[in-house]
Amino acid sequence: MMKCKQATRLMSLKQDRPLTRRERLSLRLHLTMCGACRACERQFSLLHRAGERYRPDDEDEPSPRG
Amino acid sequence: MIEHSDSPRPGADRRRRLAAVRPRLVSFALMHLRDRTQAEDAVQEALAAALEKDDSFGERSGYETWVFGILKHKILDAMRVQKRQGRWTPLEDDDTDDAIERQFHRDGHWNPEARPRGWGEPEAAFESEHFWRVFDACMIGLPDNLARVFSLRELMGLSTDDICQTVGIKENNCWVMLHRARLRLRACIERGWLEEDTP
Protein backbone atom coordinates (compact mmCIF):
# COMPACT_ATOMS: atom_id res chain seq x y z
CA MET A 1 0.00 0.00 0.00
CA MET A 2 1.36 3.37 -1.04
CA LYS A 3 2.12 5.86 1.74
CA CYS A 4 0.48 9.28 1.97
CA LYS A 5 3.64 11.16 1.11
CA GLN A 6 4.03 9.12 -2.07
CA ALA A 7 0.35 9.67 -2.85
CA THR A 8 0.79 13.46 -2.64
CA ARG A 9 3.62 13.16 -5.17
CA LEU A 10 1.20 11.55 -7.65
CA MET A 11 -1.53 14.11 -6.86
CA SER A 12 0.91 16.88 -7.63
CA LEU A 13 2.17 15.14 -10.79
CA LYS A 14 -1.42 14.78 -11.93
CA GLN A 15 -1.68 18.57 -12.14
CA ASP A 16 1.28 18.63 -14.54
CA ARG A 17 1.06 15.56 -16.77
CA PRO A 18 -1.30 12.64 -17.36
CA LEU A 19 -0.57 9.81 -14.94
CA THR A 20 0.31 6.38 -16.29
CA ARG A 21 -2.32 3.68 -15.85
CA ARG A 22 -0.31 2.17 -12.99
CA GLU A 23 0.08 5.53 -11.25
CA ARG A 24 -3.61 6.27 -11.68
CA LEU A 25 -4.70 2.95 -10.23
CA SER A 26 -2.43 3.08 -7.23
CA LEU A 27 -3.48 6.66 -6.47
CA ARG A 28 -7.16 5.79 -6.79
CA LEU A 29 -6.74 2.83 -4.47
CA HIS A 30 -4.99 5.00 -1.90
CA LEU A 31 -7.61 7.73 -2.09
CA THR A 32 -10.50 5.36 -1.48
CA MET A 33 -8.90 4.49 1.86
CA CYS A 34 -7.51 7.85 2.98
CA GLY A 35 -9.69 10.86 3.76
CA ALA A 36 -6.75 13.14 4.53
CA CYS A 37 -5.29 12.51 1.09
CA ARG A 38 -8.69 13.11 -0.53
CA ALA A 39 -8.71 16.49 1.23
CA CYS A 40 -5.16 17.14 0.03
CA GLU A 41 -6.14 16.35 -3.54
CA ARG A 42 -9.00 18.86 -3.36
CA GLN A 43 -6.55 21.43 -2.00
CA PHE A 44 -4.10 20.89 -4.87
CA SER A 45 -6.90 21.27 -7.36
CA LEU A 46 -8.09 24.45 -5.59
CA LEU A 47 -4.52 25.81 -5.80
CA HIS A 48 -4.60 25.14 -9.53
CA ARG A 49 -7.86 27.04 -9.94
CA ALA A 50 -6.61 29.85 -7.69
CA GLY A 51 -3.64 30.22 -10.05
CA GLU A 52 -5.99 30.61 -12.99
CA ARG A 53 -7.97 33.23 -11.08
CA TYR A 54 -4.80 35.09 -10.25
CA ARG A 55 -4.05 35.92 -13.88
CA PRO A 56 -4.97 39.53 -14.54
CA ASP A 57 -6.39 38.65 -17.98
CA ASP A 58 -9.41 36.81 -16.69
CA GLU A 59 -12.01 39.37 -17.64
CA ASP A 60 -15.06 37.20 -17.30
CA GLU A 61 -14.39 36.49 -13.67
CA PRO A 62 -14.66 38.98 -10.85
CA SER A 63 -11.16 40.12 -10.01
CA PRO A 64 -9.69 38.60 -6.87
CA ARG A 65 -7.16 41.40 -6.80
CA GLY A 66 -9.67 44.13 -6.03
CA MET B 1 4.41 56.30 -18.92
CA ILE B 2 6.45 56.90 -22.06
CA GLU B 3 5.07 59.28 -24.65
CA HIS B 4 6.23 59.83 -28.19
CA SER B 5 5.33 63.15 -29.74
CA ASP B 6 5.25 61.60 -33.20
CA SER B 7 2.76 58.88 -32.28
CA PRO B 8 -0.92 59.54 -31.77
CA ARG B 9 -1.99 59.90 -28.14
CA PRO B 10 -3.78 56.82 -26.88
CA GLY B 11 -7.29 57.57 -25.72
CA ALA B 12 -7.86 58.70 -22.17
CA ASP B 13 -9.97 55.61 -21.69
CA ARG B 14 -7.04 53.33 -22.56
CA ARG B 15 -4.81 55.19 -20.13
CA ARG B 16 -7.36 54.85 -17.38
CA ARG B 17 -7.65 51.14 -18.01
CA LEU B 18 -3.87 50.71 -17.94
CA ALA B 19 -3.62 52.63 -14.67
CA ALA B 20 -6.39 50.50 -13.18
CA VAL B 21 -4.80 47.17 -14.10
CA ARG B 22 -1.25 48.21 -13.18
CA PRO B 23 -1.27 47.07 -9.51
CA ARG B 24 -2.41 43.62 -10.55
CA LEU B 25 0.28 43.46 -13.21
CA VAL B 26 2.94 44.43 -10.67
CA SER B 27 1.81 41.84 -8.16
CA PHE B 28 1.73 39.19 -10.91
CA ALA B 29 5.26 40.11 -12.05
CA LEU B 30 6.46 40.13 -8.46
CA MET B 31 5.24 36.57 -7.91
CA HIS B 32 7.48 35.42 -10.75
CA LEU B 33 10.55 37.59 -10.41
CA ARG B 34 10.75 37.89 -6.58
CA ASP B 35 12.40 41.26 -7.00
CA ARG B 36 10.39 44.47 -6.79
CA THR B 37 12.67 46.53 -9.04
CA GLN B 38 12.67 43.89 -11.76
CA ALA B 39 8.91 43.47 -11.44
CA GLU B 40 8.29 47.23 -11.75
CA ASP B 41 10.65 47.35 -14.74
CA ALA B 42 8.88 44.49 -16.52
CA VAL B 43 5.49 46.16 -16.00
CA GLN B 44 6.84 49.53 -17.14
CA GLU B 45 8.21 47.95 -20.32
CA ALA B 46 4.94 46.16 -20.96
CA LEU B 47 2.91 49.36 -20.49
CA ALA B 48 5.28 51.31 -22.75
CA ALA B 49 4.98 48.61 -25.41
CA ALA B 50 1.21 48.62 -25.03
CA LEU B 51 1.05 52.39 -25.57
CA GLU B 52 3.33 52.20 -28.59
CA LYS B 53 1.38 49.41 -30.23
CA ASP B 54 -1.92 50.92 -29.25
CA ASP B 55 -2.95 51.53 -32.86
CA SER B 56 -2.31 47.98 -33.95
CA PHE B 57 -4.59 46.76 -31.20
CA GLY B 58 -7.49 48.62 -32.70
CA GLU B 59 -10.86 48.48 -31.07
CA ARG B 60 -11.01 44.83 -30.18
CA SER B 61 -12.30 43.90 -26.77
CA GLY B 62 -10.02 42.36 -24.18
CA TYR B 63 -7.55 45.21 -23.93
CA GLU B 64 -6.34 44.05 -20.49
CA THR B 65 -5.83 40.54 -21.82
CA TRP B 66 -3.69 41.89 -24.59
CA VAL B 67 -1.57 44.02 -22.21
CA PHE B 68 -1.20 41.06 -19.90
CA GLY B 69 0.04 38.95 -22.84
CA ILE B 70 2.77 41.54 -23.42
CA LEU B 71 3.72 41.43 -19.74
CA LYS B 72 4.08 37.62 -19.85
CA HIS B 73 6.77 37.96 -22.50
CA LYS B 74 8.58 40.64 -20.50
CA ILE B 75 8.52 38.41 -17.41
CA LEU B 76 9.90 35.43 -19.34
CA ASP B 77 12.68 37.66 -20.75
CA ALA B 78 13.55 38.83 -17.24
CA MET B 79 13.60 35.23 -15.99
CA ARG B 80 16.01 34.23 -18.73
CA VAL B 81 18.27 37.05 -17.54
CA GLN B 82 17.97 35.73 -13.98
CA LYS B 83 18.94 32.31 -15.28
CA ARG B 84 22.03 33.72 -17.00
CA GLN B 85 22.95 35.55 -13.80
CA GLY B 86 22.96 32.19 -12.03
CA ARG B 87 19.99 32.98 -9.79
CA TRP B 88 18.58 29.57 -10.61
CA THR B 89 19.90 26.53 -8.81
CA PRO B 90 18.31 23.14 -9.30
CA LEU B 91 17.50 21.08 -6.22
CA GLU B 92 20.06 18.50 -5.21
CA ASP B 93 18.83 14.92 -5.13
CA ASP B 94 19.53 14.52 -1.44
CA ASP B 95 18.11 17.92 -0.61
CA THR B 96 15.47 17.62 2.12
CA ASP B 97 12.84 20.16 2.97
CA ASP B 98 12.06 20.47 6.68
CA ALA B 99 8.79 22.28 6.04
CA ILE B 100 7.59 19.17 4.23
CA GLU B 101 9.24 16.57 6.45
CA ARG B 102 7.25 18.06 9.33
CA GLN B 103 3.98 17.24 7.56
CA PHE B 104 4.71 13.50 7.50
CA HIS B 105 5.71 10.79 9.95
CA ARG B 106 8.84 8.85 9.20
CA ASP B 107 6.57 6.05 7.97
CA GLY B 108 5.17 8.31 5.24
CA HIS B 109 1.75 8.95 6.77
CA TRP B 110 0.44 12.40 7.68
CA ASN B 111 1.46 13.85 11.00
CA PRO B 112 -1.79 14.25 12.96
CA GLU B 113 -1.37 18.03 13.30
CA ALA B 114 -0.66 18.41 9.57
CA ARG B 115 -3.52 16.28 8.22
CA PRO B 116 -5.26 18.20 5.42
CA ARG B 117 -8.76 19.38 6.22
CA GLY B 118 -11.64 20.57 4.11
CA TRP B 119 -11.42 24.17 2.88
CA GLY B 120 -15.08 24.49 1.96
CA GLU B 121 -16.31 25.40 -1.48
CA PRO B 122 -13.58 26.80 -3.76
CA GLU B 123 -15.94 29.51 -4.99
CA ALA B 124 -16.46 30.76 -1.44
CA ALA B 125 -12.69 30.92 -0.95
CA PHE B 126 -12.20 32.81 -4.21
CA GLU B 127 -14.82 35.37 -3.19
CA SER B 128 -13.01 36.04 0.07
CA GLU B 129 -10.49 38.88 0.37
CA HIS B 130 -9.03 37.06 3.33
CA PHE B 131 -8.27 33.99 1.21
CA TRP B 132 -6.32 36.05 -1.30
CA ARG B 133 -4.37 37.84 1.44
CA VAL B 134 -3.37 34.44 2.83
CA PHE B 135 -2.57 33.15 -0.67
CA ASP B 136 -0.29 36.14 -1.34
CA ALA B 137 1.43 35.87 2.02
CA CYS B 138 2.05 32.14 1.53
CA MET B 139 3.43 32.69 -1.98
CA ILE B 140 5.79 35.35 -0.65
CA GLY B 141 6.91 32.94 2.07
CA LEU B 142 7.97 30.24 -0.42
CA PRO B 143 11.67 29.83 -1.21
CA ASP B 144 12.48 31.75 -4.43
CA ASN B 145 12.97 28.79 -6.76
CA LEU B 146 9.83 27.00 -5.62
CA ALA B 147 7.80 30.19 -5.98
CA ARG B 148 9.12 30.87 -9.48
CA VAL B 149 8.41 27.36 -10.74
CA PHE B 150 4.95 27.36 -9.14
CA SER B 151 4.15 30.77 -10.63
CA LEU B 152 5.24 29.71 -14.11
CA ARG B 153 3.17 26.56 -13.91
CA GLU B 154 0.01 27.69 -12.13
CA LEU B 155 -0.13 31.47 -12.55
CA MET B 156 1.20 31.62 -16.10
CA GLY B 157 0.00 28.21 -17.20
CA LEU B 158 3.26 27.04 -18.82
CA SER B 159 3.85 23.30 -19.26
CA THR B 160 6.66 21.78 -17.21
CA ASP B 161 8.47 21.18 -20.49
CA ASP B 162 8.35 24.92 -21.30
CA ILE B 163 9.46 25.77 -17.77
CA CYS B 164 12.52 23.53 -18.13
CA GLN B 165 13.53 25.31 -21.30
CA THR B 166 12.96 28.76 -19.82
CA VAL B 167 14.92 28.30 -16.62
CA GLY B 168 17.20 25.43 -17.58
CA ILE B 169 16.27 22.70 -15.13
CA LYS B 170 15.40 19.04 -15.70
CA GLU B 171 11.72 18.16 -15.93
CA ASN B 172 12.04 15.72 -13.06
CA ASN B 173 13.47 18.49 -10.90
CA CYS B 174 10.59 20.67 -11.92
CA TRP B 175 8.05 18.08 -10.73
CA VAL B 176 9.86 17.71 -7.42
CA MET B 177 9.84 21.49 -6.94
CA LEU B 178 6.14 21.75 -7.80
CA HIS B 179 5.34 18.94 -5.35
CA ARG B 180 7.20 20.80 -2.60
CA ALA B 181 5.66 24.15 -3.49
CA ARG B 182 2.15 22.67 -3.37
CA LEU B 183 2.73 20.90 -0.04
CA ARG B 184 4.18 24.05 1.52
CA LEU B 185 1.40 26.22 0.14
CA ARG B 186 -1.37 23.91 1.28
CA ALA B 187 0.03 23.81 4.83
CA CYS B 188 0.54 27.57 4.92
CA ILE B 189 -2.88 28.40 3.47
CA GLU B 190 -4.57 25.94 5.81
CA ARG B 191 -3.02 27.67 8.81
CA GLY B 192 -3.90 31.15 7.61
CA TRP B 193 -7.28 30.37 6.10
CA LEU B 194 -8.82 28.13 8.75
CA GLU B 195 -7.05 28.92 11.97
CA GLU B 196 -6.68 32.69 11.83
CA ASP B 197 -9.99 33.37 10.21
CA THR B 198 -10.38 36.80 11.72
CA PRO B 199 -9.79 40.12 9.98
Image: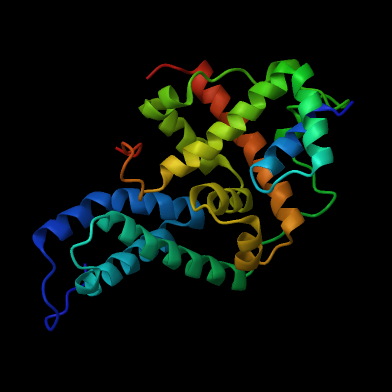
- Which quarter of the figure has residue A6? top right
- Measured along the vertical axis of the image, is residue B55 above or below residue A47? below
A8 left or right of B29 in image: right
Residue B25 vertical position relative to residue B120 in the rendered view, above or below: below
Is residue B87 among what the camera can see? no
The residue depicted at 35 percent of the width and 58 percent of the height is: B68
Residue placed most toward the observer, B187 or B87 = B187
Q: Position of residue B8 (x, y in %)?
A: 11, 76
Quarter occupied by the C terminus of chain B? top left
Q: Position of residue B136 (x, y in %)?
A: 46, 38
Q: Position of residue A13 (x, y in %)?
A: 71, 43
Task: Judge whether B55 appears above or below B13 on screen.
Answer: below
Q: Is residue B180 left or right of residue A23?
A: left
Q: Residue at 58% across / 18% down in the picture? A: B118
Task: Answer whether residue B17 is visible to the viewer in this image.
Answer: yes
Nearer the observer, B142 or A5: A5
Viewed as shown, does residue B101 lie left or right of B15? right
View extreme (bottom): residue: B6
Q: Position of residue A9 (x, y in %)?
A: 75, 38
Locate the N terminus of chain B and report the quarter of the image it occupies. Answer: bottom left
Q: Residue at x 86, y 29 (%)?
A: A2
Q: Is residue B132 left or right of residue A9?
A: left
